Image: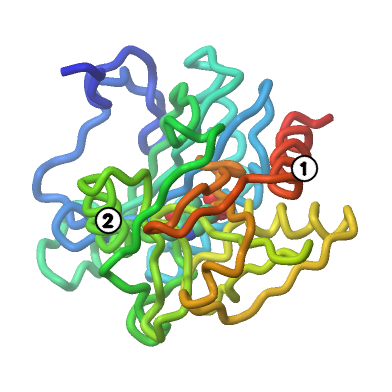
């Protein structure tokens, strides 16, 4: 094995109110979340000791729980504090932050009305999300679609929704791609498997309207940066037959940051000036410069 598994590391994980040694942060096999996907989570990054949009992520975690009927046993302010404590306890200034909550073991069926809501925070050092981030990634096209908004609560960052993402990402990786472009149930371009997507044509930035997928915090940040810099940002329905008309493409996400895309299933893009400008501006913003 050329990697260290996530359950076999040194450090501390905050679990239900206190820090436990990393390897002892365990759940029972009969945990509702494991069987029925009743878990919500956040992915965040800390830069030089500051978690980017820490409070918004805490609020989104609580909101994701509310959407699934899981009342958070903490406030957003308390969660902010725990995330910083986890960084301090593990000695990290630059790291990934994973805060999550899930239904426990009291009931084991579809109904989980009496199940305790558990919470944990883990932090770890994580480099670029994509190994070939700087030269631009190659993406395939996913077979699986983002579902209709009446099929699943798309604005919750809920573990269950990631079944489609892992299926799509594995299929793309098996074909040699770093990620997959996911369409929605209408056939419109939606996003990557864990990041939002943007395109550039004639100096303007085009991105799909987030009406059936997560309106990422990074997506919103990058739109704001772009508008402040004077770029035109157009949110609209984008169909895949338009792909050859775009010159640049990039994805955004807390883990992915701003990542240039150089190919989507044979269609090539040239990471260029606008993409670079936004990458640099995002990097400056998250580092408070
Ligand atoms: N879409 C999906 C499916 C994701 O998992 C993520 C990462 N959380 C995003 C978009 C981007 O969201 P954010 O910028 O808030 O990290």
Return the residue at label 1: 277
Q: Determine crowd level at label 2: few under 14, some 14-19, many 20+ residues with C-alpha closer than 10 A.
A: many
201 relative to 89, above or below: below
Mark 1 lies on a secondary structure that is: helix
Residue 262 point in image, percent of width and height: 51, 47
- For the point 88% across and 53% down, which residue is it? 229
> In the rendered image, is residue 72 in sight?
no
Pair 1/2: label in front: 1
Mark 2 lies on a secondary structure that is: strand
- For the point 38% across and 26% down, which residue is it? 13
124 and 138: which is toward the camera: 138
In this picture, residue 176 sits left or right of residue 217 = left
How far apart marks 1 and 2 lie (CA) works out to 43 Å
In this picture, residue 268 sits left or right of residue 77 = left
6 and 235: which is toward the camera: 235
- On the rendered image, what quadrant is the N terminus found in? top left
- For the point 66% across and 22% down, which residue is it? 49
- For the point 58% across and 22% down, which residue is it? 94
- On the rendered image, what quadrant is the C terminus found in? top right
Labelled pair 1, 2 in contact (Cβ < 8 Å): no
258 and 12: which is toward the camera: 258
In this picture, residue 94 sits left or right of residue 118 = right
Which quarter of the figure has residue 167? Answer: bottom left
Return the residue at label 2: 103
């Amino acid at each position: 094995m050329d990697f260290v598994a996530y359950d076999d590391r040194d450090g501390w994980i905050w679990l239900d109110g206190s820090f436990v040694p990393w390897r002892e942060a365990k759940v029972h096999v009969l945990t509702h979340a494991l069987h029925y996907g009743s878990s919500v989570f956040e992915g965040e990054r800390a830069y030089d000791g500051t978690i980017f949009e820490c409070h918004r992520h805490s609020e989104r975690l609580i909101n994701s729980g509310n959407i699934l009927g899981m009342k958070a046993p903490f406030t957003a302010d308390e969660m902010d504090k725990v995330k910083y404590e986890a960084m301090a306890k593990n000695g990290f200034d630059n790291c990934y932050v994973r805060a999550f909550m899930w239904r426990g073991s009291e009931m084991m069926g579809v109904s989980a009305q009496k199940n305790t809501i558990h919470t944990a925070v883990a932090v770890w050092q994580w480099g670029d999300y994509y190994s070939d981030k700087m030269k631009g990634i190659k993406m395939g096209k996913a077979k699986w679609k983002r579902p209709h908004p009446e099929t699943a609560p798309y604005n919750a960052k809920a573990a269950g929704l990631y079944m489609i993402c892992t299926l799509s990402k594995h299929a793309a990786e098996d074909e040699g791609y770093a990620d997959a472009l996911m369409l929605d149930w209408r056939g419109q371009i939606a996003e990557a498997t864990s990041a939002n997507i943007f395109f550039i044509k004639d100096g303007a930035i085009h991105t799909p309207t987030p009406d059936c997928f997560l309106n990422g915090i990074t997506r919103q940040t990058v739109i704001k940066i772009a508008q402040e810099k004077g770029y035109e940002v157009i949110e609209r329905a984008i169909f895949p037959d338009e792909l050859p008309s775009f010159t640049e493409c990039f994805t955004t996400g807390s883990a992915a940051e701003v990542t240039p895309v150089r190919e989507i299933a044979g269609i090539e893009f040239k990471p260029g000036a606008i993409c670079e400008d936004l990458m640099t501006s995002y990097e400056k913003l998250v580092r408070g410069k």
